[in-house]
Image (spheres, rainbow, N blue to C red):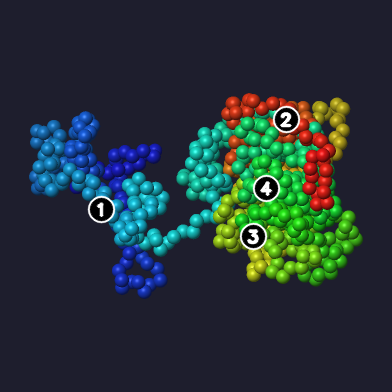
Amino acid sequence: MDYWKLSSSSGAPSLGKAPLKFSSTVQEMAQLEQQDMVANQVVEADVDLREVYFLIIHFLSSGPCQRTLGLLWNELLEHQLLPRRYHAWFSRSGVNSGNDNDDGISFPLSYNKLVERYPHIEWDHLVKLLRQLLLYKASPFHGRIGGIAPNAADVPTLLGSGSFSLLECDRSMKYKQVKPLPAYLRWPHMQADQVHGLSLREIGGGFKKHHRAPSVCSACYAIAKPSTMVQKMQNIKKLRGHRDAVYCAIFDRSGRFVITGSDDRLVKIWSMETAFCLASCRGHEGDITDLAVSSNNTLVASASNDFVIRVWRLPDGLPISVLRGHTGAVTAIAFSPRPSAIYQLLSSSDDGTCRIWDARYSQYSPRIYLPKPPDAITGKSNVPSNNGPSSSNGLQSHQILCCAYNANGTVFVTGSSDTFARVWSACKSSVEDSEQPIHELDVLSGHENDVNYVQFSGCAVASRSAMSDAFKEENVPKFKNSWFCHDNIVTCSRDGSAIIWIPRSRRSHGKVGRWTRAYHLKVPPPPLPPQPPRGGPRQRLLPTPRGVNMIVWSLDNRFVLAAIMDCRICVWNAVDGSLVHSLTGHSASSYVLDVHPFNPRIAMSAGYDGRTIVWDIWEGTPIRIYEIGRFKLVDGKFSPDGTSIVLSDDVGQIYLLNTGQGESQKDAKYDQFFLGDYRPLIRDSLGNVLDQ
């Protein structure tokens, strides 16, 4: 039979000459079961679309859609899409017999003729075929377990997709279950319910499993362009709730609240929806140096140069605990991303130690982490000479400037003023003496100045640590030296360089492998200004500082971004260490650098010039520039859903950049101070405070 077949042109179905083939898999018979591999035989079947049209019109003939039936009938006759009557082979002369539609080989049959020709085809024949397909696809336990309601997998549907699609009816597929991707490789890297996902779609976002993107790389192209997302972020709300510089401004895990910490010793909690200040947390006697939110979004911790860490409840700011023990300013804090240790709080200090606290209790003793003595490190024969600090350096004179967990919270890295970064184990040992300090696992040597910022790969977005299944043991990659293993480290220094470190070997039986230097990323010299023509006065160029203020991984771990002291943003390829872009746009140094929570192309920087720039790091171009004001911008972050930005300056102001028209924030006043913000406090022996 000369069938009309279905073909595809530009993604739309059309009628053509290519055959329509449906593939099915047939398992080999029982006599081949002893073989290691089960061979599958693919059977190809041609489908006559004229028969399909006939079944459709036959089904409509007994239904309520009679007008639709008439229209479809006429179109089928016009385009000759109903089955045809073929002449016997010995009478196919190829000469027209007088019938206008007779081509000498066949002529079309009317609907009534077809009904007479196929009396066994009832009006619901199409429904019966689909029912047979459903029964073939149905779960083997469907209808056999009495008293138990079937679940979604037991009730197949014609409209299913993915694992519920009827096109995937291969019975052998149940033996080839593919292990799902770890949560940190799913797209986008965030939690979103249906309502939240729809709102994200309006600005170019999506759900955490993109239906058209089989990988993170292709998902980057499936979403909207970066300019589409940023152009809707046009509402700017300026508020003031502090008297001095606000060096700490972060979102909570949900994006509903903003927490700020200032040199006026106050920690304030703001509503992102109304822009009202909800709570003012008092008790610190020094400047606020860092803020951190627990992964379950119940606690916020604040560090200060008064040597104390205070923990507050979200969102009402109720004091929970006072963590005292450091003998120097607390420089950085971070909650553990490990689901089994959500209340473990890591801190680093100018006293040269790190500590891990239980943030809920003031009376619990922390685990103390102390660097090994220099002679103990250099005396080991199995440690390379370039990985150990000099014995001439005094241990107590070194300040630990920064700290950061890895993606699953098992180890953390610190940077200190002795030019070294150190890697430590965050897991509690089976036999532990709380009085004995814990020493580092590895010392990373390579910088010539203070190591002022460190970060593990895979930790660019804080909201991912709130996922319950993100970092289970089975989701931790088992391969080594991979750019997706989330154990790569980047460190930066004021010496004008950054270093990418990769693990030499994976953990085995509780042992952690050492890290080795993969790429030493040197900051290139700035572009030279245009010189006058030959013979004219030459401009004398003064050396410009090329220290690195801050460094972060891109969302997909493909790039490393650094804020340079000479106002540039440098982007390196993390795979080969090559410089990709040297972004210019700031006229003063930038100490604010953050990446978008689910679009790997977008990053944000803010500087002392009062300017905020949203970059497309793939193209190396600015997407949008916000002229915030004339004051220095000292901190800023993207919200977990990527729709907002919080910024803070050196005079006590914060700026909320978000989508929409700001109707919910219109009632918020510029100045938001409480009467008791700066009243004297009474303190007890445990550090608890009370308004005098």
Q: Distance between the residues labelled 3 and 4?
A: 35 Å
Residue 515's disc is none
- Up the image or down, 315 lies above or below 669; here it is below
For mark 1, does the 10 Å Cα neighbourhood hold few (<14), some (14 to 19), or many (20 or more) residues? Answer: few
Residue 468 screen position, x and y as percent: 57, 53
Q: Which amino acid does label 1 sit on?
A: Gln
Q: Residue at x 77, y 32 (%)?
A: 675
Quarter of the image for the C terminus: give it.
Answer: top right
For mark 4, does the 10 Å Cα neighbourhood hold few (<14), some (14 to 19), or many (20 or more) residues? Answer: many
Q: Most extreme residue toward the front, as rendered?
A: 692
Total marks drawn?
4
> Which mark lies nearer to you, 3 or 4?
4
> Which mark lies nearer to you, 2 or 3?
2
Residue at label 3?
481
Residue at label 4?
299
- Would you say residue 489 is visible in this rendering? no
Label 1 vs 3, first from the N-terminus: 1
